[in-house]
Image (cartoon, rainbow, N blue to C red):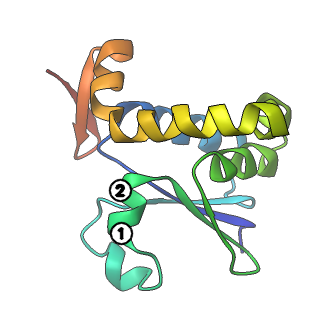
Amino acid sequence: MATLTIFYDGFCPLCVREMAQLRRLDPEAKALTLVDIQQDDMPGLYPHIDVAEAGRILLSLTADGRILRGLDSTHAAWSAVGKGHRTAFLRWPVIRWFADKVYLWFAANRYQVSYWLTGQARCDSGSCSRR
């Protein structure tokens, strides 16, 4: 069983790209289980995960049953694949408060930010579309 299950928005181009990077670093899925919250059977597969909340903020579930949110999920994911140094500074006490505020803004505006950064506004059925 993976050490962390991540519930991500499969309609978000940037989210999909980040999950692809994590998948490449964990090709045998020993550290991570990546779950697209947009899949139809999501509520049945994970009834204890609030899909609406997962649509507002990245959620992850640890092997011991704890739910992590936002950048705590991000840092746990990168740490699970041995790259936690990339996100560790986001959890430093002085930076954490600011980073969490920026993350919440990003999460609420992720489709528009994705479009600004990638030219892709939304993904569906495995492909991302241009606006």
* Amino acid under disc 1: Val
- In this rendering, the count of numbered labels is 2
**Callout 1 touching callout 2 (CB < 8 Å):** yes
Q: Amino acid at mark 2?
A: Gly
Q: Residue at x 40, y 74 (%)?
A: 50
In the picture provided, is 4 more to the left or to the right than 105? right
Q: Which residue is mark 2?
A: 55
Quarter location, residue 64:
bottom right
The alpha-carbon separation of the residues under discs 1 and 2 comes to 6 Å
Q: Which mark is residue 121?
A: none
User: To which residue does mark 1 refer?
Assistant: 51
Q: Up-down: is 95 above or below 81?
A: above
- Quadrant of image for the N terminus: bottom right
Query: Which image quarter is the C terminus in?
Result: top left
Give the left or right position of residue 87, taking residue 115 as reference: right
Splitting the image into 4 quarters, where does residue 67 fall?
Answer: bottom right
**Nearer the observer, 15 or 67:** 67
Q: Nearer the viewer, residue 5 or 72?
A: 72
| Residue occupying the point 78% across, 41% down | 91
Residue at the spot x=61%, y=44% of the render? 23
Q: Is residue 24 visible?
A: no
Q: Position of residue 81 (x, y in %)?
A: 78, 46
Q: Nearer the viewer, residue 28 or 99?
A: 99
